[in-house]
Image (cartoon, grey):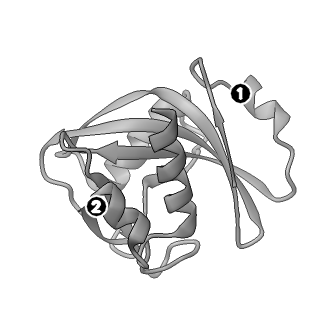
Amino acid sequence: MEFYKLDHEANITDLETFNYPNQKIGVIAHIEDELGNILLQQRGIKSHDENGLYEDVGGSLDNTDKNFKTAIIREMKEEMGEDAHVEISDSIGIYHVCKKDINWVFIIFYGKYIDGEIKIMEPEKCIGYNFFTYEEALNSNEVTESCKYLIRVLKKSS
């Protein structure tokens, strides 16, 4: 697992340095509420990996995405519905993690949960949402190790 902090909006050129076998590109939103609690989704039975565990909201790029920011906004709507109001930052970094022989390279965004109902839009991929304090997330056996890594790195870099 590696995190690379960016001082500019991520673009396709930033990804040219990553050449892993079986590589996929995705986006992640690290979402916190006004108290700093972290919103995580519990992965369902049709998730790629780590079923039943909690992770940040995100997913892979789609051919229709104009850029990385539109990709994370699309992913959030697909997973959380239209009623959840979350403000998304510009990209803040690139995160590499290998899961089940897939080298994921994720563009990372901060999200601030403002209000609105968070819905389960893809019940086979997500079975629920929960807000965790920083300590709860890091100490929970239900949060993936890769998510804990990202939470620690983001806390240090903020």
Most foreground residue, 49 or 79: 49
Most foreground residue, 125 or 158: 158
Task: Name the residue at the left extreme.
Answer: 116
Q: Are marks 2 and 1 in contact (CB under 8 Å)?
A: no
Name the image quarter holding the C terminus.
top left
Q: Is residue 53 left or right of residue 49?
A: left
Above or below residue 141? Residue 21 is above
Q: Position of residue 48 (x, y in %)?
A: 58, 72
Residue that appears at 54% across and 45% down: 153
**Tag in front: 2 or 1:** 2
| Amino acid type, callout 2 | Phe
Q: Position of residue 126 (x, y in %)?
A: 37, 70
| Amino acid type, callout 1 | Ile
Most foreground residue, 56 or 158: 158
Most foreground residue, 144 or 83: 144
Number of other residues with Cα within 10 Å of mark 1, as a class: few under 14, some 14 to 19, many 20 or more: few
The disc label shown at residue 12, or none: 1
Residue that appears at 50% across and 40% down: 156
Above or below residue 125? Residue 158 is above
Residue that appears at 48% across and 79% down: 51
Label 1 SS: helix
Q: Position of residue 79 (x, y in %)?
A: 35, 56
Q: Which of the 4 image quarters holds residue 9?
A: top right
Name the image quarter holding the N terminus.
bottom right
CA gap, disc 2 and disc 1: 33 Å
Q: Which residue carries the number 2 mark? A: 132
Above or below residue 108? Residue 40 is below
Task: Name the residue at the top extreme.
Answer: 8
Residue that appears at 40% across and 71% down: 139
Q: Which of the 4 image quarters holds residue 36?
A: top left
Q: Position of residue 34 (x, y in %)?
A: 18, 39
**Closer to the N terminus: mark 2 or mark 1?**
1
